Amino acid sequence: MILSLPEGNIPVALIRRARQSIGIRVRGGRVELIAHPAVPMSLLQAVLDKRRDWIRLHWLEQQRRCAELAAQPRQLRLAGEPLDIVHVAGQRPAARIDGRVLQVAGVAAHDRERLDATVAAWLKREAARRFPSRLAEVARYSRRQPASLSLSSARTRWGSCSASGAIRLNWRLVQAPPHILDYVLAHELAHLVHMNHSAAFWSETERLFPHWRTARQWLKQHGDTLFAFG
C-alpha cells in the first residue's frame, strides 16, 4: 500500500492480525497498518486517508529525529579497531564493512533496537568467521586439543570449557583487541588440562599466554563496553 504525502509517496506495511480495531503506527521510518484479515482493502484505504494528517505529523517527526541522529556517528569496534556506523539505503536490515566503516542498510538511524540487532547479528557472523583460526593458532601449543568450538551469548562469562573438550566463546569478544581473545582461548585451553583454577591451571594458562594478567585486567576494566550491542 502507498500513502501520498506532500513529501512524496510513503510505503505502508499491511500487517494482518486477529484484532477488533484497525491500528496505525509510525516507527522505524515506516508506516504500519494493522488490521484483521477480514477487513477489505477499500476500508483500509479509507482509514489511511482519514488519518493522513496524523500520519504525516508523526512521520515528519521521525524523519527529523533520524536526521539528527545520523549527524552524530555511532561507533563500534572490531578486533579493537573503531568502525563508524553509516546508514545506507536498503529494503532489508543488513550490514557490511567498507574500510573503517560499517554500512547498515534497511534500518532507520533512530530505530536503535533494530540497529543494535542488525549490528549484533553482523558481529556474530564475524566471530564465527574469525574465532576458529585464532583457536587453531593458540591450540598449537596446547597439551590437549579441543573437540569443538561454538559461540555463546552469556552475560557473565567470556568462555567455557566442558570435560569433553567443547569450548564456547562469547561472540562479543570479536570487538576486543586480538590479544584479549587469545587470552580467553588460552584460559579455556588450560581447562582442558586442569578443570579448576588451581596454581597448576594458572601455570598452564601462562605457558600458553604469558601476559594473561594484563589481559584479564583489561576485561575487568573494559569488558562492559563489549555489551553495547546485543
Image (cartoon, rainbow, N blue to C red):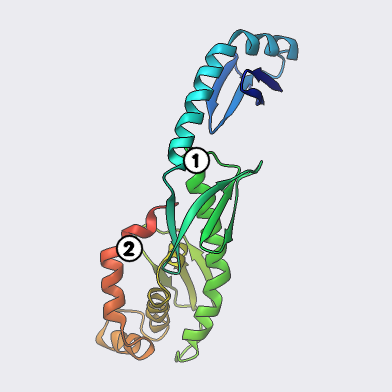
Amino acid at pointer 1: Ala
Marks counted in the figure total: 2
Q: Is residue 131 above or below residue 114?
A: below
Residue at x 44% of width, y 42% of height: 71
Q: Is residue 21 visible?
A: no
Image coords of residue 105 (percent x, y): 60, 46
Q: Is residue 23 visible?
A: yes
Residues packed near mark 1 inside 10 Å, few (<14), some (14 to 19) or many (20 plus) = many
Tags 2 and 1 touching, CB below 8 Å: no
Residues packed near mark 2 inside 10 Å, few (<14), some (14 to 19) or many (20 plus) = some
The residue to which callout 1 is attached is 109
Residue 101 located left or right of residue 7? left
The residue to which callout 2 is attached is 223
Residue at x 45% of width, y 92% of height: 143
- Cα distance in 3D space between marks 2 and 1: 26 Å
Image coords of residue 98 (percent x, y): 58, 61
Residue at x 48% of width, y 36% of height: 67
Q: Quadrant of residue 170?
A: bottom left
Q: Is residue 47 above or below residue 217?
A: above
Judged by depth in the image, the label closer to the viewer, 2 or 1, is 1
Q: Is residue 192 above or below residue 50?
A: below
**SS at mark 1 in the image:** loop
Image coords of residue 45 (percent x, y): 70, 13
Residue 94 located left or right of residue 76? right
Specify the quadrant that holds the N terminus: top right
Amino acid at pointer 2: Gly
User: 47 or 171, which is in the foreground?
Assistant: 47
Residue at x 25% of width, y 86% of height: 199
